[in-house]
Image (cartoon, rainbow, N blue to C red):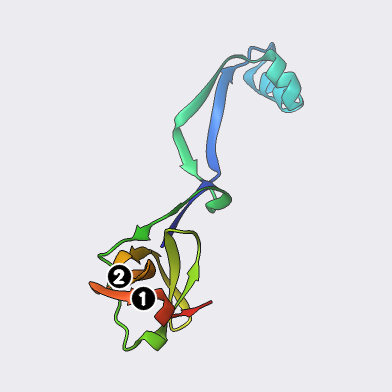
């Protein structure tokens, strides 16, 4: 079984706060002057900008960005599988030490390969505590 680690993001709603001092004949007049200004004009006048992060809330769906890591979990001799006969099993070589095991044509597990020194280095895997020689399985 493989474990895939992805970077995910989710938009947040938060805000910055600051102070803008502006002259006017009344609060309404000063507010109207601010409303008529562009964001960059207000930004130029603003002092003491602070990010207010404690009130940030998720806003939108979580998006999957990119794959960060791929870890493969390999089974050793403790692997169990409910199969009726060897014709249900097949394998694909992925290196010298492991194979991908398939059950009824579907991926089942990454499993460790062993060599039988008494059988001329015949390669085998262990399923349900039993030795299964790779040459008795279909290779795909």
Q: CA distance from mark 1 to mark 2?
A: 9 Å
All told, the count of numbered labels is: 2
Rendered location of residue 70, percent (x, y)? 49, 51
Percent x, y of residue 69: 50, 47
Q: Is residue 137 above or below residue 116?
A: below
Q: Secondary structure at mark 1?
A: strand
Against 107, residue 22 (above or below) is above
Q: Position of residue 94 (x, y in %)?
A: 50, 62
User: Residue beneath label 1, please?
Assistant: 133
Q: Residue 50 vs residue 39: left or right?
A: left
Q: Report the disc number at residue 126.
A: 2
Quadrant holding the N terminus: bottom left
Question: Would residue 35 appear left or right of 5 to someone viewing this image?
Answer: right
- The one nearer the camera, 64 or 24, is 64
| Residue 43 disc label | none
User: Sequence-wise, which precedes: disc 1 or disc 2?
Assistant: 2
Dots 1 and 2: beta carbons under 8 Å? no
In the image, 18 versus 95, the foreground residue is 95
């Amino acid at each position: 079984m493989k474990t895939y680690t992805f970077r995910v993001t989710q938009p947040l709603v938060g805000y910055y706060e600051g102070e803008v001092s502006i002259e006017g004949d009344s609060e309404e007049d000063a507010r109207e002057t601010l409303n008529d200004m562009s964001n960059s004009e207000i930004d130029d006048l603003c002092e003491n900008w602070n990010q207010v992060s404690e009130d940030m809330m998720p806003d939108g769906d979580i998006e999957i960005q990119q794959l960060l890591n791929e870890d493969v979990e390999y089974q050793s001799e403790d692997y169990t599988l409910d199969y009726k006969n060897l014709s249900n099993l097949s394998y694909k070589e992925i290196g010298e030490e492991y194979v991908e095991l398939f059950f009824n044509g579907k991926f089942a597990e990454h499993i460790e390969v062993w060599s039988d020194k008494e059988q001329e280095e015949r390669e085998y895997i262990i399923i349900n505590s039993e030795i299964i020689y790779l040459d008795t399985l279909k290779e795909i």
